[in-house]
Amino acid sequence: MTTHKVEQLVIATLGFFWCFLMWFSTAAFSPGIAAHYHLSIKSLGLLASSAIWMAPIGRIAAGWASDRFGAPRTFALLLAGCGLMSIASAFTVDYRLLFAERIFVAIAGVSFVVGIQHVAQWFDPHEIGTAEGLYAGTGNAGAGMGALVLPRLFGTHYQSAFLWMGVVALFIAALYLVRGRAAKTTGQRDLVRGRSGMRDTAFVWSRYIAIALMLAYAMSFGLEISLNAWLPGYFTRGFHDAIQSLGFTGVVGLQIAAGTFAAVESFTASLFRPFSGFMSDLFQRKGWTPLPFIARNLPYAPRLHWLGTSLILITLATSALAIAGLSGSLHLSVAVLIIIGITISCGTGGTFALVPLLFPDRPGTAAGFIGGLSTAAGIVYPLVFAGGSNIHIGYLHVAMFLFVPFVIFYFWAARCERHPEEHGLLTRVFAADEA
């Protein structure tokens, strides 16, 4: 059985890695696309945010579908559909049509919650943090791989890249459909399927702790995906002269340099995500509960404290990125990106080390809500980044006006010493069902 669950983890991770590669492949070529179609900085911000448009509702639907129909079927369908649209976009010459097609390809980003549900059906509670961290961290590396490798392989010929990625996606879809298994046991699979109704969805959506975890994921993964989409354009515009002084000239040179710097955050966030899952497991084993206000007596209380610590660090690191940019130092900005990547990984890994434990009978529905609605932040953040009078100051605006309230709400929701998942809107309506 151990060998079999490892195989399912590998299949889920491979599918997610390729979906992430496709998801942010547009961002990897954004300098070249912007130069070809003469896009303004506002249009560049719109292009960056568009990669996230389908994720909120798409992840919610995908989470429900993975509970209802099983992760292998759902994941294979996503890979095949996005792969075919990626192939179609390789032959498009009109920018409006290309924009629309790439939005459809960005549906690949909803695959995350499908894999989360899949992995949760195979691993035990004491190892769930590490398993989910390995899945998500390795898969997330697809974004960094795209920013780092794709411009070097294809230059400004994004059409060839889109074609190649679409073809490979079709092969991975077939592999997932043939080798993927929905759950460790039939009884477990049937239990999850039976909890995939509209009432169960409403229950999850109305829990205060679920809302808090959704905001926590908006702070971590929402920030990660917004930076994946935004950073290539940010470095091109914000550090144009500094990049040229390093010897990178022309559109191709700027694209390669900007993609390399942008990949720093993505790779760091990906590589440290398994570490974050491990730290959540370690907090749990050691019983560490260092933060005030957050519950200390719950079976999973240490995991709540690890996540709370991570959210504070994310807020501080995002503020530091604004300060680094305002200083005009390219080297300092890249160094801060490394720190941001680490703190993001702590938040993402910490969040989904909790989700399967809080909602074990509704893993896909919970993952869809928490991992889906939170991605709307990835739409908002690039617009804030591009909307300020200074291209660097937007990071500080996000930290102060969004992250600080999110952290306060998380502390409030995680304060309950008796089953936080029982507290929420319409509690009396659902009390009879849960009894």
Image (cartoon, rainbow, N blue to C red):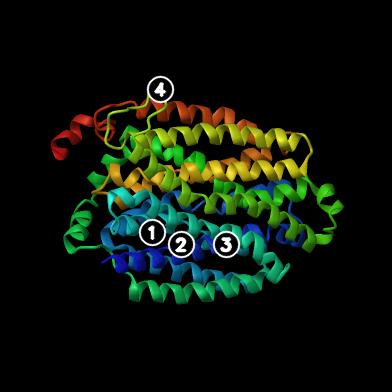
Asked if labels 1 and 2 touch by Cβ distance under 8 angstroms, the answer is yes
**Residue receiving disc 4:** 292
Q: Position of residue 25 (x, y in %)?
A: 60, 62
Q: N-terminal of the two: label 3 or label 2?
A: 2
**Residue receiving disc 1:** 115
Between the residue at mark 4 and the residue at mark 2, the CA separation in whole angstroms equals 36 Å
Q: Position of residue 131 (x, y in %)?
A: 38, 55
Residue lying at the far front in this picture: please name it: 286
Kind of residue sitting beneath label 3: Arg
**Residue receiving disc 2:** 16
Residue under the image location 58 percent in, 47 percent down: 226
Q: N-terminal of the two: label 1 or label 4?
A: 1
Asked if labels 2 and 3 touch by Cβ distance under 8 angstroms, the answer is no
Residue under the image location 56 percent in, 71 percent down: 165
Q: How many marks?
A: 4
Badge 3: residue crowd in 10 Å (few <14, some 14–19, many ≥20): many
Element under disc 1: helix
**Residue receiving disc 3:** 102
Q: N-terminal of the two: label 4 or label 2?
A: 2
Kind of residue sitting beneath label 4: Pro
Quarter of the figure that contains the N terminus: bottom left
Query: From where the camera sits, is residue 98 visible?
Result: yes
Q: Is residue 393 left or right of residue 228?
A: right
Q: Is residue 23 left or right of residue 14?
A: right
Of the pair 289 and 88, the residue shown nearer to us? 289
Frontmost of labels 1 and 4 is 4
Quarter of the figure that contains the C terminus: top left
Q: Please tell me in which quadrant of the rendered image residue 118 appears.
A: bottom left
Kind of residue sitting beneath label 2: Phe
Q: N-terminal of the two: label 2 or label 1?
A: 2
